[in-house]
Amino acid sequence: MRAGVVVAAQPGVEGLAVRAEELGLHSFWVNDTPMVHGDPFVALSLCAKATSRIRLGIGVTSPALRSAPAAASGLASLNALAPGRIICGVGTGNTARRTLGMRPTTAVRLENFTAALQDLCAGRSAEYREGDRFRDIRFLHAGAHVNTADPIEFVVAALGPRAAAVAGRRGTGLISFGLLDPAAWQALHDARRQAAQGTPREPGSRTGSYVVTSLHLLAEDEDPHGDAARDATGHLVLSLLAFAADTAADTPAFDEQLGPEEREAVRRLLDRRGTTATAPDRHTRLYPNYLGRIAPQDRDLVLPSLMNTLALVGTRDDILARITTLEQAGIEELLIQPVIDPPSEMAQLAKLLT
C-alpha cells in the first residue's frame, strides 16, 4: 500500500513536504479549513517549489468554500509549479462549513463543482452560474500563467453512497476520513462502480482510494489505551465528538449510531467547552484547535472504542494485518495525520509501508 501524510497549512510546512519526499512517501496533503488553518494553495505553492517528486494534495475543498473559477485558477497555478503532481480533493464541506457555523452543501452542487473543475483544469470551457445568470467560462490565458496540459487527479470525499456515486459519474477516486471499516469501503466502491457504468473516463484520470487516519505503533508492553496512544489519536476522536456535538440537534440519526459511552463523552465535551448542542455560536467553542494535539485534560474523552474505530493502534503485526484487510477492500493509499512529532511519525509510516 502507498503511504502519504496530511497536515495543517502553516509556516514551515514545506520542510515537512521535503522530509516526506526524502522518506519516499507518495503524497503530501494540506487541509482546506479556512477559519481554522492557513491557506492550502499558499502552503502547497511553497511545497511545490521545495520538492520534485512527491504528489501534492488539497484535502478537501468545496463549492461551499470556493467558486469553481477561483479554485481552478489555484489548482492550475499549482500545476504550473509542480506539473502532473497535483491532487484535488473535493467534498460537501462537512467540516470546513461547520467550523463557520454553516451546513455542508449538497451532492448535486458537489457534482457540478467537480465537473467544472475537471473541465477548466483541462483547458475546456465550463458553465458558471450566479443565481439566474450563467455564462460559459474558460481560462483566457495559459502557458506561463497556468498549466492545463498535465492532468490533475481529482478525488471525492465520501462516507456514504451519494458522494461515492458522484465519484463514479465523474470518473474520480475516493478519499475518506477515519473510515477503517473494510465493509464500508466495499460499499463505497460498489456505489462508485454502479454510478460509473456507461460513463466515459476522463483522459489521464486516476481513480485511487485514500483513507486518512492516525498511526501509533506500540512499544513493547505499552498500554494500547495509555496516554501516548490517546495523544497520537485524540485529534481524530475529538473531531468526531465535536461533529456529534455540533449535529446532535439537526442530525439525530448520527447520534443514534453512538453508544451510551460515546454519547456521554459528547455531553462532557459540550460542558467542557461551555456550550450546548443548540447554541448558535457552538462552532466557536467546539472547533478551535481542530485536528491539533489534544490537551492532557481531554484524554478521558479519547474512548478506546473510538480509537479503534478511527485509528491504527497496535503492534507492527497488528497494524500490518489491518492494513492488509483495508488493501483487500480496495484502499490504495494510507494517509496519516500526525500531531505529536510529524517528522518521527512520517518516518514510522515510511518504515512500516515503504
Image: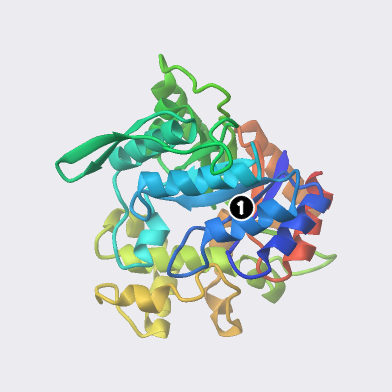
Query: SS of the residue at dot 1?
Result: strand
**Residue 152 vertical placement versus 246 (above, below):** above
Q: Which residue occupies the foreground of this view, 333 or 14?
A: 14
Q: Which residue occupies the foreground of this view, 212 or 315?
A: 212
Q: Is 113 left, or right, of 219 in this rendering?
A: left
Callout 1: few (<14), some (14-19), or many (20+) C-alpha neighbours within 10 Å?
A: many
Residue that protrudes farthest toward the left in the picture:
132
Q: Tell me the quadrant of the picture where the C terminus can be found.
A: top right
Which amino acid does the dot numbered 1 rest on?
Trp
Quadrant hosting residue 139: top left
Q: Is 163 left, or right, of 215 in this rendering?
A: left
Q: Residue at x 43, y 22 (%)?
A: 196
Q: Is 63 left, or right, of 335 in this rendering?
A: left
Q: Position of residue 347 (x, y in %)?
A: 81, 57
Q: Position of residue 29 (x, y in %)?
A: 61, 52
Q: Residue at x 59, y 51 (%)?
A: 212
Q: Position of residue 69 (x, y in %)?
A: 38, 44
Q: Residue at x 42, y 79 (%)?
A: 268
Q: Tell me the quadrant of the picture where the N terminus can be found.
A: top right
Identify the residue under disc 1.
29
